[in-house]
């Protein structure tokens, strides 16, 4: 079995539901490396060819997220400008192979591997997407002809890179019932709120945009399950939202008492 094939198979086995976490993926291994080993890898990744090989054979065989990806780039001095072209190339090549379909089985093996790499490359755009890449992410997220596995990852990645106005517009678009319905059941799109808010960090205008846009959607929400999940995620993050009269009115409308704050 090819090296890349073996890595993907191992990762898919380790990350299946029910197994303990964190799992020892290449990404987790690198993040937990000693300073001596980290320094060796920093020197190695300064070579563009070696960086590309490392991304394609290791990073894209790990289950990444915004936090881990950002930590990796910071720890190993990998810039957005150097990793972005690699990821965009992977997306072009892998999407040509997969036709944006998510495989239901592991054969043929090259399509299975390409699908996994495509998904992970989209996730990595959450830490490096420029204007062109953000446009691509929105196109993926909004295209009902593409597999939901790719669309949902694209939405999450976009939220991490969007500015305040882009965030407001995306929440209004993708949390609207008609669009949200096209993404279920693979993911509940209330996680868009979580990703947008958490990725904002100290960007106060973006956080305010998340709260304002999400509050507006939830004020009119009719799906109780959706409301409960989205309300919980937002209230855990924003005191302004948690204590707002709009939330109180929405909770009363849903016949759900406000959660008591834990000391």
Image (cartoon, grey):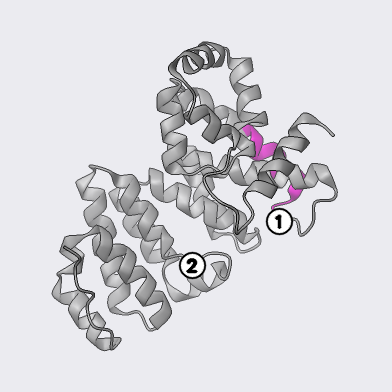
Question: Are there few (<14), some (14-19), or many (20+) residues within 10 Å of tag 2?
Answer: some
What is the quadrant of residue 177 in the picture?
bottom left
Q: Which residue is mark 2?
A: 188
The residue that disc 1 covers is: 102
95 in the magenta segment: yes
Q: Residues within 10 Å of mark 1 (few under 14, many from 20)?
A: some
Q: Can residue 87 be seen from the camera position used here?
A: yes
Q: Quadrant of the C terminus?
A: bottom left
Secondary structure of the residue carrying tag 2 is loop
Q: Are marks 2 and 1 in contact (CB under 8 Å)?
A: no
Above-or-below relation of 35 to 19: above
**What span is colored magenta in the figure?**
89-101
Percent position (x, y) of residue 254?
30, 86
Tell me the residue at 41%/41% (across/down): 67
Left or right of residue 148: residue 224: left
x, y percent for residue 147: 65, 59
Residue 220 sits above or below residue 48 on the image: below
Is residue 223 among what the camera can see?
Answer: no
Q: Position of residue 80 (x, y in %)?
A: 45, 28
Helix, strand or loop at label 1? It is loop
Q: Residue furthest front?
A: 20
State the image quarter where residue 75 is shown. Answer: top left
């Amino acid at each position: 079995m090819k090296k890349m094939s073996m890595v993907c198979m191992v990762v898919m086995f380790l990350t299946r539901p029910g197994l303990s976490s964190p799992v020892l993926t290449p990404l987790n291994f690198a993040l937990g490396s000693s300073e001596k080993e980290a320094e060796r890898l920093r020197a190695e990744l300064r070579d563009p060819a070696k960086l590309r090989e490392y991304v394609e054979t290791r990073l894209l065989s790990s289950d990444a997220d915004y936090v881990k990806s950002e930590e990796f780039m910071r720890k190993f001095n990998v810039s957005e400008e150097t990793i972005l072209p690699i990821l965009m190339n992977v997306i072009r090549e892998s999407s040509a192979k997969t036709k944006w379909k998510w495989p239901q089985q592991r054969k043929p093996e090259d399509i299975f591997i390409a699908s996994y790499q495509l998904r992970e490359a989209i996730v990595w755009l959450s830490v490096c997407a420029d204007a062109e890449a953000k446009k691509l992410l929105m196109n993926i997220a909004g295209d009902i002809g593409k597999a939901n596995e790719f669309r949902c990852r694209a939405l999450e990645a976009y939220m991490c890179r969007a500015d305040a106005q882009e965030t407001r517009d995306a929440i209004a678009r993708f949390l609207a019932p008609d669009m949200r319905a096209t993404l279920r059941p693979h993911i509940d799109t209330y996680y868009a709120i979580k990703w947008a808010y958490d990725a904002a960090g100290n960007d106060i205008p973006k956080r305010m945009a998340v709260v304002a846009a999400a509050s507006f959607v939830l004020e009119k929400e009719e799906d109780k399950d959706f409301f409960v999940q989205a309300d919980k995620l937002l209230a855990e993050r924003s005191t302004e939202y948690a204590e707002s009269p709009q939330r109180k009115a929405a909770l009363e409308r849903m016949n759900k008492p406000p959660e008591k704050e834990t000391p």
